[in-house]
Amino acid sequence: MADSSAVSEKTALGPRQFDLDRCVHCGLCLNACPTYRELGLEMDSPRGRIYQMVQVAEGAPIAPSYVEHISLCLACRGCESVCPSGVRYGRMVEDARAEIEAHIRRGWFARRLRRFVFGRLLESRAALTFVGTILYLYEASGIKALVRAMGFLKMLGRLGDIAQLAPSAEPPFFFSQIGRTFPAEGRRERRVAFLAGCIANISFARLSEATVRVLQRNGCEVVVPEGLGCCGALHVHAGLPEDARRLARRNIDTVLAGGFDAVVTNAAGCGSTLKEYGDLLEHDPEYAGRAREFSALVRDITEFLDQKGLNPAMGPVDAIVTYQDSCHLAHGQRVRQAPRKLLAAIPGLSFKEMPASDICCGSAGIYNVVENEMSMRILAKKMESVNSTGAAIVATANPGCMLQLQAGVRLHGTGQRVMHVVELLDLAYRAK
Ligand code: SF4
Ligand code: SF4
């Protein structure tokens, strides 16, 4: 979290005036907001945050309280889905964070850590492989299990809660597949680029492999292009749009040179950012048009399979399954029915809708680390909804949500398994 003790003067950054003007203060968004539902405070609601953004746009200083209220926002965009005025809240909070980032004074260590994570780690195959290897050794040596069994994490308090959320390493890492082309099974109907991403290469390697298999089963030649990497979503959410633009330009160049029918991702958070490259690069005369061309090709894997028509040759998956909407799929991309339709197409699967499935689980990128207390409160509520369904499997469509829900199952669950929709499809195809 930012060092909010620093108050500084503002410059011409921040949310665009026509975005601010769209809010008519009706309050219809309040009940869709997880932080308002938890705290009941206007200043931690969408309407209250927009009011504060307006104050800052009119000349108020960037005060510590403003930084705190904006930091506590999950950027889940639940408010956008219900807003009758079409307020583009997600873009506004990103702009507000970029403005805060330009003015906040951080300590030496925090500055270096952010520079390393956002400027090096997420983009470097070698650095991610190194971190993944350390994580793997920590688990494979039994130290992780011992630490948990001895209750060390509980003794660490909040730090222990954060450690619970750390992803596992899944060797062999998916980096080894980058640059490869996987042929379609049967007749080739589409040629798609698969976004392997950044952290997913080490922590969701099996999910990526399952995604490639499912695409192959559905008549797709799948290319994992060398130059298609980190999408920049975490950079945008952290108020670092220039870093995100640099990554976006590289991804655009790679895809537009490749002649693909689609760019497919299994990470809703990445897909949402990829689809908004047009906004990110709107003031770049060289890339604005190319960004829109790129974004028009982007599809979430569930959306892609639903639009294309799913290969029905599946075996049974006999389980009760519930579904947690990933915010950046349901609210960011407005894709709600596709994952449900895919699940319903799996023979033997019994689907049980959970209450408030489109309220955030508290994951929200690195929110569960930087705002851990609120994240855990929201997760506890989410698990009440999950438990009420009696489902044995919680499906979702975003790796970040999977990590959060896995922690939720450990803390409050009844032994449920957390799976991506694609993993369930893969299971069904292998059962045939
Ligand atoms: S953001 Fe939309 S729903 Fe919320 S108060 Fe403003 S106009 Fe109303
Ligand atoms: S993005 Fe989510 S947390 Fe932030 S104001 Fe909107 S609903 Fe609330």
Image: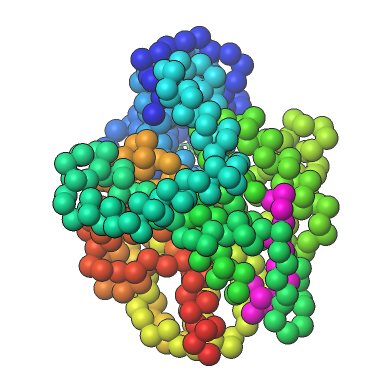
Tell whether 411 sits left or right of 136: left
Instruction: Name the residue at 47% across, 50% down.
Output: 132
In-front residue for pair 407/381: 407
Q: Is residue 92 above or below residue 104?
A: below
Is 251 on the left or on the right of 428, as rendered? right
Q: Residue at x 58, y 88 (%)?
A: 313
Q: Quadrant of residue 338?
A: bottom right
Q: Residue furthest front?
A: 141
Residue appearing at x 69%, y 51% in the figure: 228
Residue stretch rendered in magenta on the structure? 215-228
Q: Is residue 199 above or below residue 44?
A: below
Residue 373 percent location from the top left of the image: 27, 39
The residue sitting at the top extreme is: 9
Q: Position of residue 138 (x, y in %)?
A: 35, 51
Q: Quarter of the image containing the N terminus?
A: top left
Q: Classify 119 as above or below 187.
A: above
Residue 63, can we see it?
Answer: no
Q: Is residue 222 magenta?
A: yes
Query: In the shown orientation, is residue 420 left or right of residue 285?
Result: left
Please state if 245 lies on the left or on the right of 128 as rendered. right
The reply to whether the magenta stretch includes residue 243 is no
* Count of labels in the image: 0
Q: Position of residue 325 (x, y in %)?
A: 44, 59
Residue situated in front as seen by the camera: 400 or 39 = 400
* Residue 411 lies in quadrant: bottom left
- Residue at image point 44% right, 18% down: 108
